[in-house]
Amino acid sequence: MSLRSRLAWSAPLVVALAGACTSAPRAAAPRPPRDVQAPGASLASPARNDAPRVTSNACARRHSEATARPESIVRQSSTLALARHADRTIAYVADADRHAIHTIDIDGRALLATTPLAGAPSQLVVLVDGRVVVALRDSNRVAVLEPASAPERKLAPLCEARTPSEPVGLFVSPNESTLFVTSGWGHALTAFAGDTLEPRYAVPLPREPRAVLVEPSGRRAFVSHAVGDEISVVDLEDPLHTRRSVDLRRHNGEISSSRRTGQGFVLAALVGTNPERVTRLLAPLVSVDQDAGSISTETYGSRFLAAAPLVAVVDTTTESLLGRHLSVVGGLDDVGGPEKACTLPRAAALAGDRLLLGCLGVDAVLELDARARDPMRFERRRFRVPAGPMGVAAEPGRERAVVWSQFAAAVSVLDLREGASTTPAAEIVVSKELPPNLSAFEARGRLLFHATNDPRISGDGRACASCHIDGREDGITWQTPEGRHQTIMLAGRMNEGAPFGWRGETTTLRHHVGRTMKRLAGRGVFSGADSADLDALLAYLKVMPAPVRAEPDEARRALVARGRELFDDPQQGCAACHPGGGTDRSAYDVARSPFRIPFDTPSLQFVGGTAPYFHDGRYATLGDLLRGVDGTMGHTGSLSNEELSALEAYLEEL
Amino acid sequence: MKRIPVFSALALAFSLGMAATPAQAEEPPRFHDIRLADIPRIEAEPDVAWADEHYDTSGEPSPLPDVERSRPAVDWSGLPRPHLTNEKGNAAVVRIRNLYHPDNHQANQWLRYLQSDDASPIAMACGPDTGEPRGVDTYLLEVSRPEGPRYTVVEVWLDGKTCKGLALRRYQTAVQPLAGGLAYAYRTHCASCSPAQSETLHVVIPTAMSSSATGGFRYWTYLMEHLELPLGPGTSGSLRARIEEGSIRSWNRVVPRPLPVADVELRIETSFAAGEDEPTIVLATRAVNILPL
């Protein structure tokens, strides 16, 4: 990206974010969580009763009383962070379902307090002085909160700032001068001033960034991506913040392999003898064979996973894979078979030379040897934890780890001592009630959506969430019996009605989901119980959270408005098939193949975040698509570059 | 990283002296530590740079580079000869290189190996009418010596017509038993090689039913395997071998302390990030079930 285009991209964003920093946080969640108060805990005493202290900025602490503070500094965010208060370990948990931060006494096995938030928290991190920074995924903000002197009391909001769409990962620089935020849907890394949350700069990234990790020297930031085949490396010393990437497409030494990677939700770093330098980056991933979209992958002599878990080890000095490629030769047996394979890694923490990896689907925390070439193949042991492990934090000095299981709303404590039991030493359920926005049926559907090794769903252990990452899509064009087809985004689009499939081949969602399971060599649905599960899964598909986009600034709004005019203009003809950005429920031979195959008109909702484009992924960007389909999908050939940019902007806002 | 984790777990079988049975559940690995410095290290020359063109002007194969032709004559004393069989109770392997692809393991497959095993004594013919020039390498593992286990490697270019050979490469080194004697290891250092190829881990193990090595080389016979994994900066390698109890039984004929007879999986991974001081070796073993063929 040129300097000019980079500045053109980031400057408006920073301007838009500037001024958004405010000391007046938004109202708390409209529906406060139920049954989250520990016996004896007083939630009635707001933290603002603490004696205020005159401060120079809104984000600074307002009282000087002792609060829970981190014992060992963890600068990278998770859904769970630890601090010490007196002789107790306190866990702060970001509960996305209940829009709250829970304060939990790990030693006392008790929920101490629940702080309602203005949105769904994705991750949080504890600063040295005890303040808590949290990313609010669906309100596109980061907020700073202050603990009271007594952990039984709620956190008090201090300040907040707007971010690009969907803030997820946080990282606090060593001197806490900078807060880095990744935005998933907004595909950006944004740097904020650590003391004021004033935005400093934003760096555009490829799709779906998640975890961010800045090396101790502060020179580079590494960012994982839930979708795509790379780890971004952002040069923080460069005034332009140049982005490089580590190519993860090399599998078994072949760069032209059909294998792709995804599910990059977490990162961990190993530091060598020089404390300023991270020598290895550990990136739990899944390697997928895009040619195995529809076939049984059991082959003679060995069973291979279409989605094989691994931990990519990046040599940070050379910014390349250690060993130059990822090895997925071992097949199923190396990773414990489909019943044990960690194909939905969602949480990670280092405990000495051990990597603790939280895995959805198998609902386990794996203890891996972090020094291995592929730690996934050096599993020391695994801990069974409640459903939905989304966060893990280690207490190396105490030889224990704490895990947050979102689906079960439970915190579990793991004993990491050699020979200790692999069942949690303690479990603390923060709520036995369903989340406010999820029925029991839908909650069951969510479990099924993330269920790996369900023979009804697939023959090789793949879960719905394997391809529909976070309910979206994996950016992969799979080989299917009908040709190469892209995964379709689900979240936010499942209420648009029939038909379903690229060819519009099914008229009900139930039929289509069952058909997909069959294609993945799943057993399908036969019994009454299966049928109820399928209904639950369908119910969840319709409520899974869609991306919430940040408000565009004025210039952007004008561009989008112009794009909308062009979209609706009969001369372009976009709206004829995509009325209002939706679908006319008809099929057309847009590919102009010799076989004259009609493709269903897909809805364009959220199309801006689902690159690549076309049923076979032939267009890398929306711009490529608009320029490439002239005459077959509308008429864009006569549009100027400015008009195409406006049209593209409109599509991105759909 | 001064210490190297060695997950030596002949878990159930070896620590308790029990044999794995088909009904036995597969065991998780256990962990031990060893020191990198415990693995002997010797200087070694770079591999022979076999000539790409395999035929000279008269049409005769001639892959040996001219620079190698001044090597001394090989001294066969103390080495296993192709027609001898296990006379000293040591594990020995003779490997014949493919004339046309001397550096290509895949091209040679199992035909390039002979072994001095009782079960299959093999004589290698040479003489005025039968011989061709060929590469003949010998590997001799002597683990019961009072002075400690030793390994000898000699790479020879044999003139089949005269039955004389040139010793292209020869070294002898102490070897470190790993995982209770399931493997023996040493390191070679090559000062004139590229940094990535400057250091190599050599591991000698019983022949595995199935094994795969990434980033290194693997020579195998019916008696033992010799594997090489990179230890140079910026490299990594991995090995996974499933060793049947039959191979352990054969191994027990040459090792000083018999190992419990069981199906075993051995994994070794090497890695050395460019910013680190020294390579890391991770080794794991566990009792497993290997289905009979």
Image (cartoon, rainbow, N blue to C red):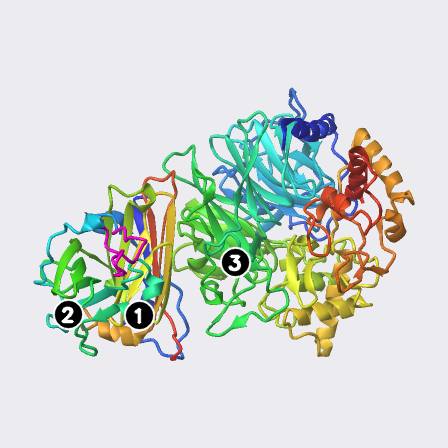
**Three-letter amino acid code at the position of disc 2:** Cys
Res B126 label? 2
Position in image of residue A621 (x %, y %)? 70, 44
Boundaries of the magenta span: B48-65
Residues behind callouts 2 and 1 on a single chain? yes
> Circle 1 — which element?
helix
What residue sits right under mark 1 in the picture? B110
* Number of residues whose C-alpha sits closer than 10 Å to that of mark 3, classed few (under 14), some (14–19) or many (20 or more): many
Quadrant placement of the C terminus of chain B: bottom left
Q: Nearer the viewer, residue A411 or B105?
A: B105
> Circle 2 — which element?
loop
Front of the two marks 1 and 3: 1
* Number of residues whose C-alpha sits closer than 10 Å to that of mark 1, classed few (under 14), some (14–19) or many (20 or more): some
- Direction from residue B267 to residue B251 in the image, left or right: left
- Direction from residue A329 to residue A643 in the image, left or right: right
Quadrant placement of the N terminus of chain B: top left
Q: Is residue B82 above or below residue A92?
A: below
Asked if the residue under mark 3 is in contact with the one under mark 1, i.e. CB atoms within 8 Å, the reply is no
- Specify the principal SS of the magenta part: loop
Res A309 label? 3
**Three-letter amino acid code at the position of disc 3:** Pro
Position in image of residue B114 (x %, y %)? 22, 70
> Circle 3 — which element?
strand
